[in-house]
Amino acid sequence: MEVLLVIDGSPYSQMIIGMLRAFKLPRETQVTVMTVVPEHKFLGGLSFNLLRSRDSEQSERQERQREQAVELVESAIRELGNTKLELKRLVRWGNTAEEILKAAAEEEVSLILIGAKGLTGSSQFTIGSVAQKVIRYTTANVLMVRKETTAISRVLIAVDGSKYSEIATQFLLQLPLPDSEIMLVAAVQSYSEALSKIPTLDWRTNPELISILRDGEEKAAQDIITRFSTQLSQTGYRVSSSIMHGGAAESILKVAKENSPDLIVIGAKGLTGIKSFLLGNVAEKVAASSECSVLICRSSVTE
């Protein structure tokens, strides 16, 4: 398994290292500790560093930046030294999100660990621009670290019967978290909300159809929960479940707020073009508003 651990010297860097340690990954796991020294590029490929390349003071400043970046990576390497993981170092210059995406593709990583950025208001969280771009455009799984975690004892998995919720569950099964409690959440959309999107159907004159839709969705949700519960229980996890009524993102966030999981696991949605994935609306809302770390899955392969 290839992991890319992205640090930047912010408080999130220490949280990311703590999250990686909490997983207790096997020794054969290869972890690349990466930092990026930001450099803005202007039209024509110009940059401040290029324009000031003959300035000795600027050269000294660049060297100090390089040394600080190297020390930042080395400090993380020292902290992870007793994990016996295969550790590699990577320092890049340039646009932070672009360099992370490039490195993830070049290293063919299965998992990127990156910190969330920024707060707005008293309870609404936002994703920083770098994290947002990475989770939106990478083809790897992304663990967006939101807060300090020393052990992962409670995990919430969003399931909806799609291939991505299957992928998310399979990826989690390949991570060593046998002592964790797993909470499965399936959301049954409110029929009035769903039918509001079909303006040609007068649901008031179709009560039988409404009943069939509601009952059918309830049964489908229960079948999905049962299938995943059986699969996880057989692997040794303690499993609980909830079937919620309403929007998927809102339901996931509500259960998370009531149960305070250490981690939310959710599948990514949507595919655009040939190589790049777009983050689904539900995953994006959960990542932006969750108070805990979020693992967004696109692939179950960890080899």
Image: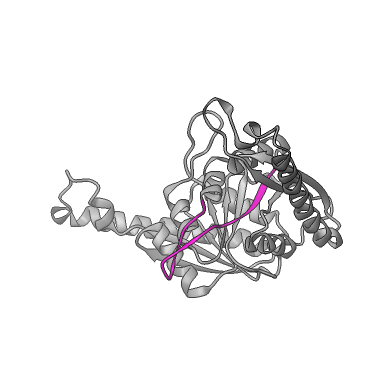
Q: Is residue 122 above or below residue 115?
A: below
Q: Is residue 303 in sight in this rendering?
A: no
**Residue 54 place in picture, x, y as percent:** 70, 32
Of 159 and 259, which appears nearest the observer?
A: 259
Q: Position of residue 55 (x, y in %)?
A: 70, 36
In the rendered image, residue 97, in percent from the top left (x then y), is placed at: 59, 43
Q: Residue at x 64, y 42 (%)?
A: 100
- Compared with 272, 214 (above or below) is below
Point out the stretch of residues depicted in magenta.
109-128
In this view, the residue farthest toward the left is 205
Does 49 sit above or below residue 21?
above
* 229 sits to left or right of 193: right
Going 49% across and 68% down the picture, which residue do you hit?
Answer: 256
Tell me what residue is drawn at x 13 percent, y 53 percent.
205
Pick the quarter of the image with the C terminus.
top right
Q: Is residue 289 left or right of residue 77?
A: left
User: Tell me, what colour scheme is on the image?
Assistant: one colour
**116 part of magenta stretch:** yes
Q: Position of residue 174 (x, y in %)?
A: 70, 54
Q: What number of labels is visible?
A: 0
Q: Nearer the viewer, residue 232 or 219?
A: 232
> Camera-side residue: 156 or 121?
121
The answer, for residue 157, to whether it is visible in the render is yes
State whether residue 96 is above or below residue 294: above
The extreme top residue here reads 44
Q: Residue at x 61, y 36 (%)?
A: 48
Residue occupying the far bottom of the picture: 258
